[in-house]
Image: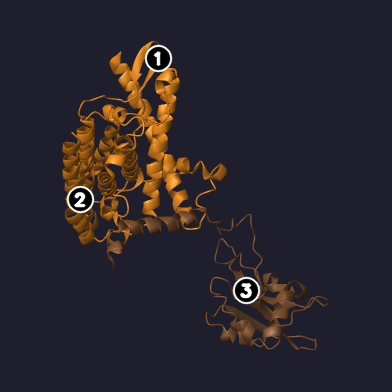
Amino acid sequence: MTLWERLYFPEIIHGMSITIRAFFRPKFTRQYPEERWTPPPVFRGRPVLVMEDETGIERCVACGLCARVCPSLAIEVQAAETELDKERYPERFEINMLRCIFCGFCEEVCPEEAIIMSKDFELTFSNTRDAIYGKDKLLIPASQLKDRLDFLKQYR
Amino acid sequence: MVAIVALIKVIVVVLVILGTVAYLVLLERKVSAYMQDRIGPNRVGPKGLFQPFADILKLVLKEMIVPRKANKFVHALAPVISITVALSALAVIPFGNYVVIGGQKISLMIANVNIGVLYILAMSSLGVYGITLSGWASNNKYSLLGGLRSSAQMISYELSLGLSIIGVLMIDGTLRLDKIVESQSGWHWNIFYQPLGFLVFVTAAFAETNRLPFDLPEAEPELVGGYHTEYSGMRWGLFFLSEYTNMIVSSALMATLYFGGWSLPYVNYSAMSPNIAAIVQVATFLAKTGIFIFIYMWVRWTVPRFRYDQLMNVGWKIMLPLAFLNLIGTGAVMLAVR
């Protein structure tokens, strides 16, 4: 260290000049509940099941790949037969949101592009039973998920 | 009559200081937030201005936990010592010259004793007891370490604190704080005659008040909370209160000893009516004190904590010789000028 640095007081003044500049800089804090944030399409929010707009039927064919790949074993699928072209559909589809780690593996592995990550990150529940999201909460019309579907077409 | 006036002054000063401390805590949080590019508390009340009341309410409602094997009496006594000593140091601070109420001159300091500076030094050294006793009484190794550190630190820095003040006393030739203020009227502020002494004084004052960069008694990363690890609720609040009161006292002392206290250059107080002059004086004094309090916070959120050996090295090998140098230099110059 030079003598100037060893004096220490000039360096304190230097440090104080830095902090006082930060004092007057604009702040980045977002006032959350009032100022909302819409995530970009890359964002991985809670996984949802895509529902076709016209028919109101989910794309899922209950192959169970998502449940198989899920590292935290959050997904449970129970398949059943149907008269539709796809022949199989999930009778029960449950994601335990306390277990989900938002890794997006289910979306990656899905052959039908039926389960995708949404922009929803505000998840609250007051007991563990409410944390298990069934088909009622998971089915979202494809039109509402357009951003993510377009993003997946472009980059996957 | 004199006793009643003194009592009223005591009550006013204590209440004002306690209120100020509550808002200093908010100020500190705001200052730290702004220096870290954050906003800080802004939810309770407009712009977060009612945050202190929420804090105090929380502290009062919290349980005061006493460790099972603690010395209960000393454990309860220590925070009281801390706050009493911190508040009593305010007794000799001159907030202004005097006000005239009902034809009577009332001096704007609680006690005009002729050894004001000595009294403040005595009170600031008594503050060690509160911290050391709390560290010992908690029956916790971290508390004890914090207490020991604080006693060693405060004793080391007391020397240079006292020695740096002697320079001021030599120039002004008095121990009365009001006389020291009067002799600095105009631009005869002691900072211009005692720059080195002021530097030593500020450093020692930071160490005396246990503020960063010298907050080793409560160094969170090493000692959990230091001497107040085992305190909670309002007892902990008292320690907090005394820390901020000490900060106010030493800021007031810096303003009084080195920056002319309530005097303001180019302002002729004798031309004004005494009560208006008193208001201007108090405002001047509070502004000067406020600037030093801000500097306290500014330094805290800038400079990292010293290591313990560095602290002792700075105290004994740098600050003490500098204080002596300042003393001898002042004496030599005074001899030469005379």
Judging from the image, mark 1 belongs to the subunit labelled B
Question: Which chain letter goes with mark 3?
Answer: A
Helix, strand or loop status at disc 1: strand
Q: Amino acid at mark 1?
A: Ile
Chain that is coloured orange in the picture: B
Q: Residue at x 33, y 48 (%)?
A: B232
Compared with residue B140, is residue A87 higher up or lower down, i.e. above or below? Answer: below
Residue topped by disc 1: B101
Is there one chain holding both mark 2 and mark 1?
yes
Residue B19: where, in percent of width, then height?
42, 35
Tell me if label 2 and label 1 are in contact, CB under 8 Å.
Answer: no
Of callouts 2 and 1, which one flags the residue occurring earlier in the amino acid sequence? 1
Judging depth in this view, the residue of A150 and B245 nearest the camera is B245
State the image quarter where residue B276 is shown. Answer: top left
Give me the chain letter of mark 2. B
Disc 1, disc 3: CB below 8 Å?
no
Task: State the image quarter where residue A27 is shown.
Answer: bottom right
Q: Is residue A155 visible?
A: yes
- Note the chain letter of the brown one: A
Q: Which mark is residue A43?
A: 3
Q: Nearer the viewer, residue B173 or B25?
A: B173
Q: CA distance from mark 3 to mark 2?
A: 60 Å
Could you say where residue B207 lies in the image, as x and y percent from the top left?
26, 49
Residue B300 lies left or right of residue B30; in this view the side is left
Asked whether residue B69 is in view, the answer is: no
Q: Give the amino acid type for the residue marked by disc 2 in the picture.
A: Leu
In front of the other: label 3 or label 2?
A: 2
User: Label 1 to label 3, Cα distance in Å?
Assistant: 70 Å
**Residue at which label 2 appears:** B322
Left/right placement of residue B115 relative to residue B281 reads left
Residue B222 tag number: none
What quarter of the picture does the N terminus of chain B occupy?
top left
